[in-house]
Image (cartoon, grey):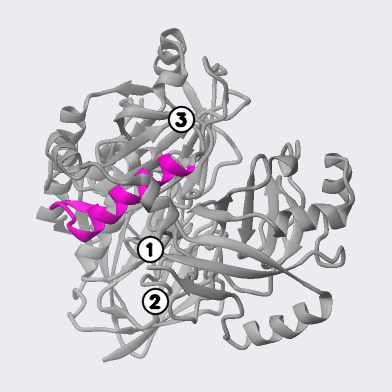
Protein backbone atom coordinates (compact mmCIF):
# COMPACT_ATOMS: atom_id res chain seq x y z
CA UNK A 1 0.00 0.00 0.00
CA UNK A 2 1.25 3.41 -0.91
CA UNK A 3 0.87 6.62 1.07
CA UNK A 4 2.43 10.06 1.11
CA UNK A 5 3.95 12.25 3.75
CA UNK A 6 3.41 15.93 3.05
CA UNK A 7 5.90 18.46 4.38
CA UNK A 8 3.84 21.43 5.57
CA UNK A 9 6.74 23.34 7.06
CA UNK A 10 10.48 22.72 7.35
CA UNK A 11 13.15 24.85 8.98
CA UNK A 12 16.66 24.87 7.55
CA UNK A 13 18.56 21.59 7.65
CA UNK A 14 15.66 19.15 7.42
CA UNK A 15 17.06 16.26 5.37
CA UNK A 16 16.48 12.64 4.46
CA UNK A 17 19.13 10.36 5.93
CA UNK A 18 19.77 6.66 5.77
CA UNK A 19 22.81 4.99 7.32
CA UNK A 20 25.08 6.77 4.85
CA UNK A 21 26.73 6.59 1.44
CA UNK A 22 29.56 4.18 2.12
CA UNK A 23 32.16 2.54 -0.11
CA UNK A 24 33.00 5.64 -2.20
CA UNK A 25 35.24 7.61 0.15
CA UNK A 26 38.08 6.56 -2.18
CA UNK A 27 36.51 8.84 -4.81
CA UNK A 28 36.07 11.78 -2.47
CA UNK A 29 32.46 10.99 -1.53
CA UNK A 30 31.35 11.95 1.99
CA UNK A 31 29.19 9.28 3.67
CA UNK A 32 26.75 11.79 5.28
CA UNK A 33 24.11 9.80 7.25
CA UNK A 34 22.55 10.75 10.58
CA UNK A 35 24.30 13.09 13.05
CA UNK A 36 22.99 10.96 15.96
CA UNK A 37 23.18 7.37 14.74
CA UNK A 38 21.76 5.96 18.02
CA UNK A 39 18.65 8.16 17.82
CA UNK A 40 18.30 7.34 14.11
CA UNK A 41 18.41 3.59 14.83
CA UNK A 42 15.97 3.95 17.71
CA UNK A 43 13.42 5.69 15.48
CA UNK A 44 13.86 3.53 12.38
CA UNK A 45 13.66 0.29 14.38
CA UNK A 46 10.58 1.37 16.32
CA UNK A 47 8.76 2.28 13.08
CA UNK A 48 10.21 -0.43 10.82
CA UNK A 49 11.69 2.23 8.51
CA UNK A 50 14.57 2.16 6.03
CA UNK A 51 15.44 5.85 6.44
CA UNK A 52 14.39 8.86 8.46
CA UNK A 53 13.85 12.58 8.19
CA UNK A 54 16.42 14.42 10.26
CA UNK A 55 14.85 17.53 11.78
CA UNK A 56 17.05 20.34 13.01
CA UNK A 57 16.40 23.18 15.47
CA UNK A 58 14.18 24.98 12.94
CA UNK A 59 11.54 22.25 13.35
CA UNK A 60 9.09 20.80 10.84
CA UNK A 61 5.43 19.93 10.33
CA UNK A 62 4.01 16.91 8.49
CA UNK A 63 0.71 15.50 7.33
CA UNK A 64 -0.13 12.09 5.87
CA UNK A 65 -2.09 11.46 2.69
CA UNK A 66 -3.68 8.28 1.40
CA UNK A 67 -3.32 6.13 4.53
CA UNK A 68 -2.47 6.33 8.20
CA UNK A 69 1.32 6.20 8.60
CA UNK A 70 3.24 4.51 11.41
CA UNK A 71 5.64 7.22 12.64
CA UNK A 72 8.41 7.01 15.24
CA UNK A 73 10.13 10.08 16.63
CA UNK A 74 13.40 10.05 18.61
CA UNK A 75 16.42 12.23 19.24
CA UNK A 76 16.97 15.20 21.53
CA UNK A 77 14.08 16.56 23.56
CA UNK A 78 12.05 18.18 20.84
CA UNK A 79 8.56 19.51 21.43
CA UNK A 80 6.40 16.95 19.59
CA UNK A 81 2.71 17.56 19.03
CA UNK A 82 0.06 15.57 17.27
CA UNK A 83 -2.91 17.83 16.48
CA UNK A 84 -1.78 20.09 19.31
CA UNK A 85 -1.49 17.27 21.84
CA UNK A 86 1.97 17.14 23.42
CA UNK A 87 3.70 13.77 23.10
CA UNK A 88 6.91 12.44 24.62
CA UNK A 89 10.05 13.43 22.70
CA UNK A 90 10.50 9.76 21.80
CA UNK A 91 7.24 8.24 20.66
CA UNK A 92 5.45 6.00 18.20
CA UNK A 93 2.23 7.31 16.69
CA UNK A 94 -0.40 6.84 13.99
CA UNK A 95 -0.39 9.79 11.61
CA UNK A 96 -3.86 9.82 10.07
CA UNK A 97 -4.51 11.85 6.90
CA UNK A 98 -6.45 14.51 8.79
CA UNK A 99 -3.77 14.83 11.51
CA UNK A 100 -0.81 17.15 11.78
CA UNK A 101 2.53 16.31 13.41
CA UNK A 102 4.58 19.31 14.51
CA UNK A 103 8.15 19.24 15.83
CA UNK A 104 9.83 22.23 17.41
CA UNK A 105 13.12 22.61 19.24
CA UNK A 106 12.62 21.70 22.90
CA UNK A 107 14.78 22.19 25.97
CA UNK A 108 17.64 20.03 24.70
CA UNK A 109 19.03 18.47 21.56
CA UNK A 110 19.83 19.53 18.00
CA UNK A 111 18.60 16.63 15.87
CA UNK A 112 15.37 14.66 15.91
CA UNK A 113 14.50 11.72 13.64
CA UNK A 114 11.08 11.12 12.13
CA UNK A 115 10.90 7.58 10.78
CA UNK A 116 7.99 6.33 8.67
CA UNK A 117 7.25 2.60 8.79
CA UNK A 118 7.74 0.95 5.40
CA UNK A 119 9.90 1.81 2.41
CA UNK A 120 10.70 5.27 1.12
CA UNK A 121 10.01 5.22 -2.64
CA UNK A 122 13.00 7.24 -3.75
CA UNK A 123 15.81 6.06 -6.02
CA UNK A 124 19.19 5.96 -4.29
CA UNK A 125 22.07 8.18 -5.45
CA UNK A 126 25.37 6.23 -5.52
CA UNK A 127 23.74 3.54 -3.39
CA UNK A 128 22.19 5.69 -0.66
CA UNK A 129 19.36 8.16 0.02
CA UNK A 130 21.37 10.19 2.53
CA UNK A 131 21.44 13.91 1.73
CA UNK A 132 24.85 15.56 1.44
CA UNK A 133 23.85 19.13 0.67
CA UNK A 134 27.38 20.44 0.06
CA UNK A 135 28.12 18.07 -2.84
CA UNK A 136 24.50 17.91 -3.98
CA UNK A 137 24.32 14.13 -3.59
CA UNK A 138 21.04 12.58 -2.47
CA UNK A 139 17.68 14.33 -2.16
CA UNK A 140 17.59 18.09 -1.63
CA UNK A 141 16.89 19.36 1.90
CA UNK A 142 13.14 19.20 2.48
CA UNK A 143 10.99 22.28 2.11
CA UNK A 144 7.32 23.12 2.60
CA UNK A 145 5.29 21.60 -0.22
CA UNK A 146 7.48 18.52 -0.67
CA UNK A 147 5.82 15.12 -0.63
CA UNK A 148 7.47 11.76 0.04
CA UNK A 149 5.91 8.50 -1.12
CA UNK A 150 6.13 5.40 1.08
CA UNK A 151 5.19 1.77 0.55
CA UNK A 152 3.77 0.91 3.95
CA UNK A 153 3.41 -2.55 5.45
CA UNK A 154 3.12 -2.80 9.24
CA UNK A 155 -0.03 -1.26 10.73
CA UNK A 156 0.45 1.83 12.90
CA UNK A 157 -0.40 1.70 16.62
CA UNK A 158 -3.99 2.64 17.50
CA UNK A 159 -2.87 5.34 19.92
CA UNK A 160 0.37 7.29 20.42
CA UNK A 161 2.83 5.46 22.69
CA UNK A 162 5.89 6.69 24.53
CA UNK A 163 9.25 5.13 23.68
CA UNK A 164 11.59 4.53 26.57
CA UNK A 165 15.17 4.63 25.29
CA UNK A 166 17.54 5.31 28.19
CA UNK A 167 20.58 5.20 25.85
CA UNK A 168 19.41 8.51 24.39
CA UNK A 169 19.50 10.27 27.77
CA UNK A 170 21.40 13.52 27.70
CA UNK A 171 24.14 13.78 30.27
CA UNK A 172 26.79 16.22 31.36
CA UNK A 173 29.34 13.40 31.54
CA UNK A 174 32.54 14.05 29.61
CA UNK A 175 32.51 12.99 25.94
CA UNK A 176 34.93 10.09 25.65
CA UNK A 177 37.60 9.98 23.00
CA UNK A 178 40.64 8.06 21.86
CA UNK A 179 43.78 10.11 21.34
CA UNK A 180 45.13 10.11 17.80
CA UNK A 181 45.70 9.63 14.93
CA UNK A 182 48.03 12.67 15.15
CA UNK A 183 48.33 13.24 18.92
CA UNK A 184 52.10 13.21 18.37
CA UNK A 185 51.77 16.62 16.67
CA UNK A 186 51.10 18.07 20.15
CA UNK A 187 53.30 18.37 23.25
CA UNK A 188 52.03 16.47 26.32
CA UNK A 189 51.04 19.72 28.07
CA UNK A 190 48.92 20.74 25.05
CA UNK A 191 47.13 17.39 25.16
CA UNK A 192 46.54 17.99 28.90
CA UNK A 193 45.18 21.45 28.12
CA UNK A 194 42.82 19.93 25.53
CA UNK A 195 41.60 17.23 27.96
CA UNK A 196 41.22 19.55 30.97
CA UNK A 197 39.48 22.42 29.21
CA UNK A 198 35.80 23.22 29.34
CA UNK A 199 34.70 23.64 25.69
CA UNK A 200 31.75 25.51 24.26
CA UNK A 201 30.03 24.62 20.97
CA UNK A 202 30.57 27.57 18.62
CA UNK A 203 27.82 29.36 16.73
CA UNK A 204 29.08 28.37 13.27
CA UNK A 205 28.50 24.66 13.78
CA UNK A 206 26.67 22.44 11.32
CA UNK A 207 26.47 18.88 9.99
CA UNK A 208 30.01 19.20 8.68
CA UNK A 209 31.78 20.27 11.87
CA UNK A 210 31.24 21.64 15.38
CA UNK A 211 33.55 24.45 16.37
CA UNK A 212 34.88 24.13 19.91
CA UNK A 213 35.55 27.39 21.74
CA UNK A 214 38.12 27.38 24.52
CA UNK A 215 41.88 27.67 24.90
CA UNK A 216 43.98 27.61 21.71
CA UNK A 217 45.80 24.30 21.27
CA UNK A 218 49.31 24.79 19.93
CA UNK A 219 51.00 22.41 17.52
CA UNK A 220 54.46 21.11 18.30
CA UNK A 221 55.34 20.24 14.68
CA UNK A 222 53.39 22.70 12.53
CA UNK A 223 49.76 22.48 11.45
CA UNK A 224 50.17 20.96 8.00
CA UNK A 225 50.07 17.22 7.55
CA UNK A 226 49.96 15.25 4.33
CA UNK A 227 46.19 14.87 3.79
CA UNK A 228 44.74 11.59 4.99
CA UNK A 229 41.32 10.01 5.55
CA UNK A 230 39.05 11.48 8.23
CA UNK A 231 36.92 9.29 10.52
CA UNK A 232 33.57 10.46 11.97
CA UNK A 233 34.24 12.33 15.22
CA UNK A 234 37.84 13.27 14.46
CA UNK A 235 38.92 16.43 16.30
CA UNK A 236 41.06 18.47 13.99
CA UNK A 237 43.26 21.35 15.14
CA UNK A 238 43.70 23.84 12.28
CA UNK A 239 46.30 26.60 12.18
CA UNK A 240 44.41 28.94 14.54
CA UNK A 241 44.41 26.29 17.30
CA UNK A 242 40.59 26.20 17.60
CA UNK A 243 39.42 22.56 17.48
CA UNK A 244 36.82 21.34 14.98
CA UNK A 245 34.90 18.11 15.63
CA UNK A 246 34.34 16.64 12.16
CA UNK A 247 30.92 15.02 11.82
CA UNK A 248 28.56 13.40 9.29
CA UNK A 249 29.08 15.87 6.41
CA UNK A 250 32.87 16.17 6.89
CA UNK A 251 35.24 16.12 3.94
CA UNK A 252 36.53 12.58 3.41
CA UNK A 253 40.18 13.72 3.66
CA UNK A 254 41.89 16.52 5.52
CA UNK A 255 45.26 18.18 5.94
CA UNK A 256 45.31 19.31 9.60
CA UNK A 257 46.45 17.18 12.55
CA UNK A 258 43.69 15.30 14.37
CA UNK A 259 44.47 15.24 18.08
CA UNK A 260 41.75 12.72 19.01
CA UNK A 261 38.59 10.95 17.81
CA UNK A 262 35.28 10.77 19.72
CA UNK A 263 34.22 7.18 20.44
CA UNK A 264 31.18 5.75 18.65
CA UNK A 265 29.02 5.49 21.78
CA UNK A 266 29.38 9.23 22.50
CA UNK A 267 29.08 10.68 18.97
CA UNK A 268 25.33 11.17 19.28
CA UNK A 269 25.69 12.90 22.65
CA UNK A 270 28.21 15.32 21.12
CA UNK A 271 26.01 15.90 18.05
CA UNK A 272 22.97 16.72 20.20
CA UNK A 273 24.76 19.62 21.91
CA UNK A 274 23.73 23.07 20.74
CA UNK A 275 25.79 26.16 20.03
CA UNK A 276 26.49 27.80 23.39
CA UNK A 277 26.41 24.54 25.36
CA UNK A 278 29.48 23.27 27.19
CA UNK A 279 31.30 19.97 27.24
CA UNK A 280 34.51 18.38 28.37
CA UNK A 281 36.43 15.36 27.14
CA UNK A 282 37.88 12.27 28.74
CA UNK A 283 40.47 10.06 27.06
CA UNK A 284 39.82 6.31 27.17
CA UNK A 285 41.66 3.34 25.69
CA UNK A 286 40.51 1.08 22.86
CA UNK A 287 39.10 -1.58 25.22
CA UNK A 288 36.94 0.92 27.10
CA UNK A 289 35.73 2.45 23.84
CA UNK A 290 34.73 -0.97 22.51
CA UNK A 291 33.03 -1.94 25.80
CA UNK A 292 30.99 1.29 25.58
CA UNK A 293 30.20 0.57 21.94
CA UNK A 294 29.03 -2.96 22.77
CA UNK A 295 26.79 -1.75 25.60
CA UNK A 296 25.36 1.04 23.42
CA UNK A 297 24.52 -1.08 20.38
CA UNK A 298 23.28 -4.03 22.48
CA UNK A 299 20.81 -1.68 24.16
CA UNK A 300 19.65 -0.33 20.78
CA UNK A 301 19.28 -3.91 19.46
CA UNK A 302 16.84 -4.74 22.27
CA UNK A 303 14.73 -1.80 21.08
CA UNK A 304 12.87 0.96 22.84
CA UNK A 305 10.13 -0.08 25.28
CA UNK A 306 6.65 1.10 24.33
CA UNK A 307 4.75 2.78 27.14
CA UNK A 308 1.06 3.79 27.11
CA UNK A 309 0.42 7.47 27.72
CA UNK A 310 -1.76 8.86 30.49
CA UNK A 311 -5.25 9.86 29.32
CA UNK A 312 -4.70 13.62 29.60
CA UNK A 313 -1.16 14.42 28.65
CA UNK A 314 0.43 17.78 29.19
CA UNK A 315 4.07 18.73 28.86
CA UNK A 316 4.12 19.06 32.66
CA UNK A 317 2.73 15.58 33.26
CA UNK A 318 5.22 14.13 30.77
CA UNK A 319 8.08 15.75 32.62
CA UNK A 320 6.64 14.69 35.99
CA UNK A 321 6.39 11.09 34.86
CA UNK A 322 9.77 11.31 33.23
CA UNK A 323 8.36 10.00 29.97
CA UNK A 324 10.19 12.44 27.76
CA UNK A 325 12.04 9.75 25.89
CA UNK A 326 13.03 8.16 29.20
CA UNK A 327 15.42 11.05 29.37
CA UNK A 328 17.05 12.04 32.61
CA UNK A 329 18.72 15.40 32.54
CA UNK A 330 21.86 14.86 34.56
CA UNK A 331 23.29 18.12 33.36
CA UNK A 332 22.35 20.20 36.42
CA UNK B 1 60.71 9.09 3.41
CA UNK B 2 59.32 5.60 3.79
CA UNK B 3 59.10 4.11 7.30
CA UNK B 4 60.92 0.84 7.98
CA UNK B 5 57.61 -0.51 9.29
CA UNK B 6 54.18 1.08 8.79
CA UNK B 7 52.60 2.91 11.72
CA UNK B 8 49.15 1.89 12.99
CA UNK B 9 47.21 4.93 14.20
CA UNK B 10 43.81 4.69 15.92
CA UNK B 11 41.10 6.95 14.52
CA UNK B 12 38.59 6.11 17.24
CA UNK B 13 37.75 2.48 18.04
CA UNK B 14 36.26 1.77 14.60
CA UNK B 15 38.92 3.10 12.22
CA UNK B 16 42.63 2.57 11.85
CA UNK B 17 45.14 4.46 9.72
CA UNK B 18 48.08 2.53 8.29
CA UNK B 19 50.74 5.12 7.54
CA UNK B 20 53.68 4.15 5.34
CA UNK B 21 55.93 7.21 5.42
CA UNK B 22 56.39 10.97 5.48
CA UNK B 23 55.58 13.18 2.54
CA UNK B 24 54.03 12.83 -0.90
CA UNK B 25 56.01 10.21 -2.76
CA UNK B 26 55.16 7.70 -5.49
CA UNK B 27 56.86 4.78 -3.70
CA UNK B 28 54.98 5.40 -0.43
CA UNK B 29 51.72 5.84 -2.37
CA UNK B 30 52.34 2.57 -4.22
CA UNK B 31 52.69 0.81 -0.84
CA UNK B 32 49.34 2.29 0.21
CA UNK B 33 47.63 1.16 -3.01
CA UNK B 34 49.18 -2.31 -2.82
CA UNK B 35 47.79 -2.89 0.67
CA UNK B 36 44.45 -1.46 -0.46
CA UNK B 37 44.35 -3.87 -3.41
CA UNK B 38 45.23 -6.88 -1.25
CA UNK B 39 42.67 -6.00 1.44
CA UNK B 40 39.98 -5.56 -1.19
CA UNK B 41 40.83 -8.89 -2.79
CA UNK B 42 40.51 -10.72 0.56
CA UNK B 43 38.80 -8.47 3.13
CA UNK B 44 39.19 -9.59 6.75
CA UNK B 45 35.95 -10.16 8.70
CA UNK B 46 34.70 -6.83 10.03
CA UNK B 47 36.47 -4.60 7.51
CA UNK B 48 33.93 -2.12 6.12
CA UNK B 49 35.80 0.27 3.82
CA UNK B 50 39.27 1.45 2.90
CA UNK B 51 40.26 4.99 1.90
CA UNK B 52 43.65 5.32 0.20
CA UNK B 53 45.41 8.68 0.46
CA UNK B 54 48.97 9.85 -0.38
CA UNK B 55 50.79 7.98 2.35
CA UNK B 56 48.17 6.22 4.45
CA UNK B 57 45.30 3.78 4.13
CA UNK B 58 42.31 4.43 6.39
CA UNK B 59 40.42 1.28 7.37
CA UNK B 60 36.90 1.59 8.75
CA UNK B 61 36.03 -1.57 10.67
CA UNK B 62 33.52 -2.96 13.14
CA UNK B 63 35.41 -3.64 16.39
CA UNK B 64 32.57 -5.88 17.63
CA UNK B 65 33.52 -8.25 14.77
CA UNK B 66 37.30 -7.96 14.73
CA UNK B 67 39.70 -6.70 17.39
CA UNK B 68 42.30 -4.08 16.64
CA UNK B 69 45.04 -6.66 17.24
CA UNK B 70 43.46 -9.20 14.88
CA UNK B 71 43.03 -6.52 12.23
CA UNK B 72 46.68 -5.47 12.53
CA UNK B 73 47.75 -9.12 12.30
CA UNK B 74 45.68 -9.49 9.12
CA UNK B 75 47.29 -6.36 7.66
CA UNK B 76 50.79 -7.50 8.58
CA UNK B 77 50.18 -10.79 6.81
CA UNK B 78 49.46 -8.75 3.65
CA UNK B 79 52.60 -6.62 3.86
CA UNK B 80 54.65 -9.20 2.01
CA UNK B 81 57.40 -7.68 -0.13
CA UNK B 82 56.26 -5.97 -3.28
CA UNK B 83 58.37 -5.00 -6.30
CA UNK B 84 57.66 -1.28 -6.04
CA UNK B 85 59.76 -0.35 -9.07
CA UNK B 86 57.76 -2.76 -11.24
CA UNK B 87 54.52 -1.51 -9.72
CA UNK B 88 55.42 2.12 -10.47
CA UNK B 89 56.50 1.44 -14.03
CA UNK B 90 53.28 -0.51 -14.74
CA UNK B 91 50.25 1.57 -13.83
CA UNK B 92 46.93 -0.11 -14.62
CA UNK B 93 46.01 2.59 -17.13
CA UNK B 94 47.22 5.81 -18.75
CA UNK B 95 44.76 8.65 -19.27
CA UNK B 96 45.14 11.42 -21.81
CA UNK B 97 43.07 14.32 -20.52
CA UNK B 98 42.21 17.10 -22.99
CA UNK B 99 42.95 20.46 -21.36
CA UNK B 100 42.32 23.99 -22.59
CA UNK B 101 44.86 26.54 -21.31
CA UNK B 102 43.22 29.49 -23.08
CA UNK B 103 42.90 32.25 -20.43
CA UNK B 104 39.16 32.37 -21.19
CA UNK B 105 38.96 28.88 -19.63
CA UNK B 106 42.02 29.11 -17.36
CA UNK B 107 40.92 31.88 -15.04
CA UNK B 108 44.10 32.06 -12.93
CA UNK B 109 46.77 31.18 -15.50
CA UNK B 110 48.01 34.76 -15.83
CA UNK B 111 48.16 35.25 -12.04
CA UNK B 112 49.97 31.91 -11.57
CA UNK B 113 52.38 32.65 -14.43
CA UNK B 114 53.21 36.06 -12.90
CA UNK B 115 53.88 34.44 -9.51
CA UNK B 116 56.11 31.84 -11.16
CA UNK B 117 57.94 34.48 -13.22
CA UNK B 118 57.16 33.00 -16.63
CA UNK B 119 54.72 33.58 -19.48
CA UNK B 120 51.35 31.78 -19.48
CA UNK B 121 52.09 29.76 -22.68
CA UNK B 122 55.32 28.47 -21.15
CA UNK B 123 53.45 27.46 -17.98
CA UNK B 124 50.92 25.58 -20.12
CA UNK B 125 53.67 23.92 -22.13
CA UNK B 126 55.46 22.72 -18.98
CA UNK B 127 52.21 21.49 -17.43
CA UNK B 128 51.19 19.59 -20.57
CA UNK B 129 54.66 18.12 -21.01
CA UNK B 130 54.79 16.25 -17.69
CA UNK B 131 53.81 12.71 -16.68
CA UNK B 132 51.49 12.58 -13.69
CA UNK B 133 50.33 9.92 -11.30
CA UNK B 134 46.83 9.93 -9.78
CA UNK B 135 47.58 9.76 -6.06
CA UNK B 136 44.15 10.00 -4.51
CA UNK B 137 40.70 11.55 -4.54
CA UNK B 138 39.75 13.86 -1.71
CA UNK B 139 37.97 17.02 -0.62
CA UNK B 140 34.90 16.53 -2.83
CA UNK B 141 33.53 13.85 -5.21
CA UNK B 142 35.78 13.39 -8.22
CA UNK B 143 38.54 15.74 -7.04
CA UNK B 144 41.65 13.85 -8.12
CA UNK B 145 45.11 14.85 -6.83
CA UNK B 146 48.10 14.24 -9.11
CA UNK B 147 51.82 13.97 -8.42
CA UNK B 148 54.45 14.74 -11.05
CA UNK B 149 54.07 18.51 -11.32
CA UNK B 150 57.36 19.96 -12.65
CA UNK B 151 59.35 21.63 -9.87
CA UNK B 152 59.22 24.92 -11.81
CA UNK B 153 55.42 24.99 -11.37
CA UNK B 154 55.38 24.49 -7.58
CA UNK B 155 53.38 27.42 -6.26
CA UNK B 156 52.33 28.48 -2.75
CA UNK B 157 48.58 28.11 -2.15
CA UNK B 158 46.52 31.27 -1.78
CA UNK B 159 46.21 32.76 1.69
CA UNK B 160 42.42 32.82 1.25
CA UNK B 161 40.34 30.70 -1.14
CA UNK B 162 39.15 31.88 -4.55
CA UNK B 163 35.51 31.49 -5.55
CA UNK B 164 34.07 28.21 -6.83
CA UNK B 165 36.11 26.52 -9.56
CA UNK B 166 34.51 25.93 -12.96
CA UNK B 167 33.49 22.34 -13.72
CA UNK B 168 36.52 20.33 -14.85
CA UNK B 169 39.03 22.84 -13.52
CA UNK B 170 42.69 21.83 -13.85
CA UNK B 171 44.63 23.33 -10.96
CA UNK B 172 48.06 23.62 -9.41
CA UNK B 173 48.87 24.20 -5.72
CA UNK B 174 51.94 23.42 -3.67
CA UNK B 175 53.88 20.71 -5.52
CA UNK B 176 50.73 19.03 -6.87
CA UNK B 177 48.29 19.17 -9.73
CA UNK B 178 44.56 18.58 -9.38
CA UNK B 179 41.52 17.98 -11.55
CA UNK B 180 38.35 19.22 -9.86
CA UNK B 181 35.11 17.60 -11.00
CA UNK B 182 32.55 19.89 -9.37
CA UNK B 183 32.66 23.59 -8.48
CA UNK B 184 34.06 24.35 -5.00
CA UNK B 185 36.03 27.23 -3.53
CA UNK B 186 39.77 26.45 -3.38
CA UNK B 187 43.13 27.92 -2.48
CA UNK B 188 44.67 26.50 -5.69
CA UNK B 189 45.13 28.16 -9.11
CA UNK B 190 42.93 27.28 -12.10
CA UNK B 191 45.42 27.00 -14.99
CA UNK B 192 43.25 25.04 -17.42
CA UNK B 193 39.96 23.31 -17.93
CA UNK B 194 39.08 19.85 -19.20
CA UNK B 195 35.80 19.06 -20.95
CA UNK B 196 35.99 15.54 -19.43
CA UNK B 197 33.75 14.75 -16.46
CA UNK B 198 35.84 12.98 -13.83
CA UNK B 199 32.59 12.37 -12.01
CA UNK B 200 29.23 11.90 -13.73
CA UNK B 201 26.39 10.58 -11.62
CA UNK B 202 24.47 8.90 -14.42
CA UNK B 203 27.49 7.27 -16.10
CA UNK B 204 28.64 3.75 -15.30
CA UNK B 205 31.17 3.93 -13.74
CA UNK B 206 30.54 7.39 -12.25
CA UNK B 207 34.27 7.97 -11.55
CA UNK B 208 36.84 7.67 -14.35
CA UNK B 209 40.37 7.38 -13.03
CA UNK B 210 41.70 5.09 -10.31
CA UNK B 211 44.44 6.02 -7.84
CA UNK B 212 47.73 4.80 -9.30
CA UNK B 213 46.75 5.53 -12.92
CA UNK B 214 49.17 7.50 -15.13
CA UNK B 215 47.88 10.84 -16.46
CA UNK B 216 48.91 13.25 -19.25
CA UNK B 217 47.32 16.48 -20.41
CA UNK B 218 46.75 17.19 -24.09
CA UNK B 219 46.45 20.90 -24.96
CA UNK B 220 43.29 21.80 -26.89
CA UNK B 221 42.09 25.16 -28.20
CA UNK B 222 38.89 26.89 -27.18
CA UNK B 223 36.95 25.60 -30.20
CA UNK B 224 37.93 22.00 -29.50
CA UNK B 225 37.01 22.51 -25.84
CA UNK B 226 33.48 23.54 -26.78
CA UNK B 227 33.07 20.61 -29.19
CA UNK B 228 34.36 18.06 -26.67
CA UNK B 229 32.39 19.68 -23.85
CA UNK B 230 29.15 19.19 -25.81
CA UNK B 231 30.06 15.54 -26.44
CA UNK B 232 30.98 15.00 -22.78
CA UNK B 233 27.71 16.63 -21.71
CA UNK B 234 25.90 14.05 -23.85
CA UNK B 235 27.57 11.26 -21.89
CA UNK B 236 30.61 10.49 -24.05
CA UNK B 237 34.03 9.92 -22.47
CA UNK B 238 36.32 12.36 -24.27
CA UNK B 239 39.51 11.52 -22.36
CA UNK B 240 41.42 8.53 -23.76
CA UNK B 241 42.19 5.51 -21.60
CA UNK B 242 44.99 3.17 -22.51
CA UNK B 243 45.00 -0.08 -20.52
CA UNK B 244 48.55 -1.01 -19.58
CA UNK B 245 47.92 -4.25 -17.67
Q: Residues within 10 Å of mark 3 (few under 14, many from 20)?
A: some
Secondary structure at numbered mark 3? loop
Q: Determine which of the numbered discs, if any, sits on residue B22 in the image.
A: 3
Residue B235: image quadrant is: bottom right
First to last magenta residue range: B26-48
For this view, does A63 lie left or right of residue A254?
left
Residue at (68, 74) in percent of width and height: B195
Q: Residues within 10 Å of mark 1 (few under 14, many from 20)?
A: many
Mark 3 or 2, which is nearer the eye?
3
Quadrant where the C terminus of chain B is found in the figure:
bottom left
Dominant SS of magenta comes to: helix
The percent coordinates of residue A52 (x first, y second) are: 35, 66
Q: Mark 2 highlights which residue?
A: A124
Whether residue B72 can be seen here? yes
Quadrant where the N terminus of chain B is found in the figure:
top left
Q: Determine which of the numbered discs, if any, sits on residue A21 in the image.
A: 1
Residue A18: image quadrant is: bottom left
Mark 3 or 1, which is nearer the eye?
3
Q: CA distance from mark 1 to mark 2?
A: 9 Å
Toward the top, the furthest residue is: A189
Secondary structure at numbered mark 1? loop
Amino acid sequence: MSARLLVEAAGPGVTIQDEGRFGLSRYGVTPAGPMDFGAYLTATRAAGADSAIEVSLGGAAFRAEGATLCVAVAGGEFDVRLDGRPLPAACLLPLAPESRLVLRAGPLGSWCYVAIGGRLDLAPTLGARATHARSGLGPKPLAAGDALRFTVAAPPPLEPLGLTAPWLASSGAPVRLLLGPQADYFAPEEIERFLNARWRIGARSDRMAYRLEGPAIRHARGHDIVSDGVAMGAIQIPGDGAPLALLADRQPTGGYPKIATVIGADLGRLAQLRPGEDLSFRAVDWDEAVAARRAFFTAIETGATRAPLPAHVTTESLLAENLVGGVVNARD
Amino acid sequence: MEYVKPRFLDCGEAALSVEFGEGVDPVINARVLTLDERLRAAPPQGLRETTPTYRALLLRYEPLEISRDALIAAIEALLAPVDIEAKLSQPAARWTIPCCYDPAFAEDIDAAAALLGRAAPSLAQLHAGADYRAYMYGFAPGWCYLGGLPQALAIPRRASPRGPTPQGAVLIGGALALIAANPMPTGWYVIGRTPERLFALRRDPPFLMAPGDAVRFEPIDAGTFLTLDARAAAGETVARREALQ
